[in-house]
């Protein structure tokens, strides 16, 4: 039986077995466009103030890590922040978590933040453990119970105060509210009491009246870790592959010990 080389009536030439090649001569470059993703973050993200952290060198010796607990450089927490830069990031995977204390409720949930490869000035953006991300365009409402203490530099809360919503104390079972500009002022995030308007203070026992403060402050997040150790790839630029960094993802946690009240005395002295 021969093979009919003619047309079989169905448009198939039986004598010419020619099939199209499914493989292209040059596969298009599937590079991840990190620059485009950075632009998306900048357009849709939240502005942060990135505080770069470093261990405080105020040590008496390295072998025992004997850091001064009343260190004026780092407020005694062992980490200092040597530079601040503005950056934009995107929040997601927020967890709901609160820490209930006698002195107040602190939001300490964790979240994942996606951050670009560069700052707005085009310098490389790097994020590391203990860095801080502060949201300057938003505030959260917090409250604290404090004992009045006569301090020349004012009384600080755990977060620098942006605005006060309410301050009051109780004396002889009477609620005593305080007014901004009449009883106190806010200077550099601290409460500065006006002379003669402050809560009572027992000089013998060195103890002042307890007052409650409801205030607004900027959220502060600490970087806990990278979600990926190193995110790099290659991108085709003018026919040449070059290494590039990809946007970073970091796990952050709300900071609820921004200022340690027990160190206020040493800082003011």
Image (tube, grey):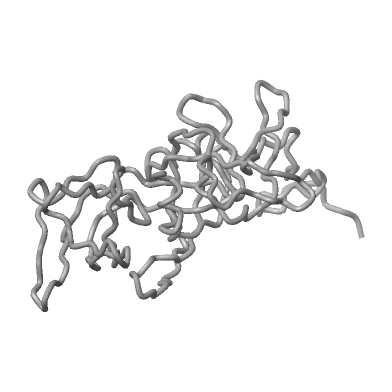
**Quadrant assignment for the N terminus:** bottom right
Position of residue 27 relative to residue 239, above or below, is: below
Which residue is at the front of the view, 143 or 233? 143
Which residue is at the front of the view, 170 or 49? 170
Percent position (x, y) of residue 30?
A: 65, 40
Residue furthest toward the top? 238
Identify the residue shown where x is 48% and y is 24%. Answer: 121
Question: 85 left or right of 130?
Answer: left
Question: 119 left or right of 164?
Answer: right
Which residue is at the front of the view, 70 or 136? 70
Q: Is residue 40 visible?
A: no
Position of residue 95 relative to residue 243, above or below, is: below
Q: Is residue 245 visible?
A: yes
Residue furthest toward the bottom? 173
Percent position (x, y) of residue 81?
A: 53, 39
Percent position (x, y) of residue 2?
A: 90, 55
Identify the residue shown where x is 34% and y is 70%. Answer: 103
Q: Which of the 4 image quadrants contains residue 187?
A: top left
Position of residue 22 relative to residue 240, above or below, is: below
Residue furthest toward the right? 1
**Quadrant assignment for the C terminus:** top left
Question: 166 left or right of 190?
Answer: left
Which residue is at the front of the view, 261 or 118? 261
Identify the residue shown where x is 66% and y is 33%. Answer: 244
Question: 44 left or right of 174?
Answer: right
């Amino acid at each position: 039986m021969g093979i009919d080389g003619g047309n079989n009536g169905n448009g198939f030439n039986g004598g010419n077995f020619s099939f199209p090649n499914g493989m292209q001569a040059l596969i298009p470059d599937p590079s991840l466009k990190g620059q485009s993703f950075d632009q998306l973050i900048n357009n849709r993200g939240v502005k942060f103030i990135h505080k770069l952290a470093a261990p405080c060198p105020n040590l008496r010796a390295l072998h025992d890590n004997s850091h001064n607990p009343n260190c004026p450089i780092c407020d005694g927490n062992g980490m200092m922040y040597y530079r601040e830069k503005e950056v934009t990031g995107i929040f997601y995977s927020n967890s709901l978590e609160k820490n209930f204390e006698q002195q107040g409720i602190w939001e300490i949930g964790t979240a994942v933040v996606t951050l670009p490869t560069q700052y707005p000035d085009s310098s490389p953006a790097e994020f590391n453990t203990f860095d801080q991300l502060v949201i300057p365009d938003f505030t959260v409402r917090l409250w604290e119970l404090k004992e009045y203490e006569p301090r020349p530099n004012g009384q600080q809360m755990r977060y620098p105060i942006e605005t006060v919503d309410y301050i009051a104390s109780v004396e002889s079972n009477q609620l005593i509210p305080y007014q901004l500009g009449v009883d106190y002022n806010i200077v550099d995030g601290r409460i500065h009491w006006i002379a003669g308007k402050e809560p009572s203070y027992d000089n013998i026992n060195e103890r002042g009246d307890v007052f409650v403060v409801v205030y607004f402050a900027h959220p502060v997040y600490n970087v806990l870790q990278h979600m990926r150790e190193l995110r790099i790839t290659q991108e085709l630029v003018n026919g040449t592959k070059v290494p590039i960094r990809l946007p970073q993802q970091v796990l952050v946690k709300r900071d609820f010990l921004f200022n340690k009240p027990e160190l206020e005395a040493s800082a003011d002295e």
